[in-house]
Amino acid sequence: MSSVPSSSQPEDRERCDVLIVGGGINGCGIARDLAGRGFKVVLCEKDDLAAHTSSSSTKLIHGGLRYLEYYEFSLVRKALQEREVLLKSAPHIMWPLRFVMPHDPAQRPAWMIRIGLFMYDHLARREVLPPSRGIDLREHVAGAALKKEFKRGFVYSDGWVDDARLVVLNAIDARERGAQVLTRTRCTSALREAGGWNVTLEGPEGRRELRARAVVNAAGPWAESFLRGVARPAAGEALATKSLRLVKGSHIVVPRIFTHAHAYIFQNPDKRIIFAIPYQDSFTLIGTTDIEIEGDDPGAAKISQDEIDYLCVQASRYFAKPITKADVVWTYSGVRPLLDDASGDPSAVTRDYLLESNTGAAPLLSVWGGKITTFRKLAEDAADEVARMLGEARPAWTEGAFLAGGDLSPWIGAASRPDADFERFVDALHARYPWLGGALGRRLARAYGTRVEKIIGDARSMADLGEQVAPGLYESELRYLQREEWATSGQDVLWRRSKLGLHLTPQARAQVDEWMRTHAAPAAQQRKEAPLAAQP
């Protein structure tokens, strides 16, 4: 562990109001909210943004229908309230999705499902999403891919999100409101003293010494270990009071099973559920599992053969065409940091969050648990609490605010429905740049929204976008990702900023990686943030 100068040494440290440790959805969401309230914020992330849990979700904006069985009414209502707030904030990376639930009489009875869906429809106000209803699978488009034994079902609404891009958009907004976002930068020591924290950061530019008035621990699966190993309390204090249960959720991706736009939710004999979701046009995403894990490195979690078999078997209970492990083209696993509530079944552990304040010598806020759907509300609650601890209450602002690239009105005029607005935006993009091509234009619109202008710039033809490094991927986009989105490797580009890795050959993926290596900008040039002031 790096040594930290004591408070008796010369105060030549950089300073900030709040240091946030963790560059997942919660950390970036909190950084955005606090920066928007005028606080001087630094966020550090030891790897890439969304490198772990936040890019490994089932990619749903949902209330959590199954949580009703565990009487998590408050969590479900909170998540349902957030669905449409989020859909309106970034219609390029989020959109409504209809889910089909085939009825299996051996599982939950139909009357129970009807009651659950009625509650799901009415626990929060809906303006965009249509209500649930019963369907005849012999006539509905979603029935064709299923076994003939499934004749009845239900359909309801939730939403889809590009989870890794959601993290990046929050980080961009945080930076544009004055925050420093430091990736590949590890917090190696945080010493709590009267009136503040003395912090050491280790990153591409070497060591940085920082003085922060408050620290937010948003390290996700590493939140407990941060308190027990990195954060150093003042004399007589204890920082770690909670425990996490680390639950691995794994997913498989297979070639497209169905061509319609609906997703499926399947009930399993073990009382769990899995989803089958249209993914990246050519694929179907199936997940997830719930496996409790132990160990010192949550980032090393990988799918097991048992999990692959489980997902294949459960999906094959419903689909007419069986799914085998030979069909699997990609897998990913994420570790959910769930607050230990003594539940025996990992599936029953609450997905709600807890914010733990510790004022002591200097403010510390630890984020325990949470889910991607409630990240904005979590960030708002966290910013309220940090502001309270610092004695500088400032109003919340993110409800109703757009995320980076999400305000389409300069292109399309007044907004109507998020999904319809996006299609109008695609039409406007093609009208402005007819040479761009339909597939490329739609992909860029989906990923970047109105920030696509930062990629196209003054280009008047495809040749002006630079070399085509891989099919559909041009130098102008790669330069943008380096300059604006903290991308430093092919992995960052192909599996987090996009999912182009699914569509490219190994040779093409290697070409992207090589381009990123040979065109890497020095870390100091990639940083767009203004330097912090030294302590007077």
Image: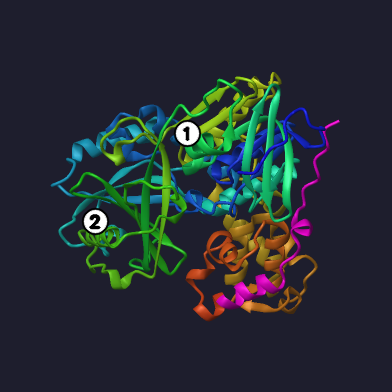
Q: Is residue 513 magenta?
A: yes
| Mark in front: 2 vs 1 | 1
x 51%, y 75%: residue: 504
In three-dimensional space, the C-alpha distance between marks 2 and 1, rounded to whole angstroms, equals: 41 Å
Task: Determine which quarter of the picture holds residue 431.
Answer: bottom right
Disc on res. 297: none
Residue 340, given in percent of the width and then of the height, sits at 37, 33
Q: Which residue is mark 1?
A: 368
SS at mark 1? strand
x 72%, y 66%: residue: 479
Left or right? Give the position of 77 relative to 413.
left
x 19%, y 36%: residue: 111
Tell me whether the residue at label 2 lies in contact with that at label 1, contact meaning CB atoms closer than 8 angstroms.
no
x 79%, y 32%: residue: 9
Crowding at label 2, few (<14), some or many (≥20) Cα neighbours within 10 Å? many
Q: Which residues are magenta?
A: 510-536
Task: Determine which quarter of the picture holds residue 452.
Answer: bottom right
Figure quadrant of the C terminus:
top right
How many marks are shown on the rendered structure? 2
The mark nearer the N terminus, 2 or 1, is 2
Residue 134, given in percent of the width and then of the height, sits at 27, 45
Residue 211, given in percent of the width and then of the height, sits at 73, 33
Figure quadrant of the N terminus:
top right
Three-letter amino acid code at the position of disc 1: Trp
Crowding at label 1, few (<14), some or many (≥20) Cα neighbours within 10 Å? many
Q: Which residue is mark 2?
A: 137
Question: Which residue reaches farthest left?
Answer: 106
Three-letter amino acid code at the position of disc 2: Leu
Q: Taking 449 as reference, is 343 above or below it?
A: above
Q: Taking 384 as reference, is 508 above or below it?
A: below
SS at mark 2? loop
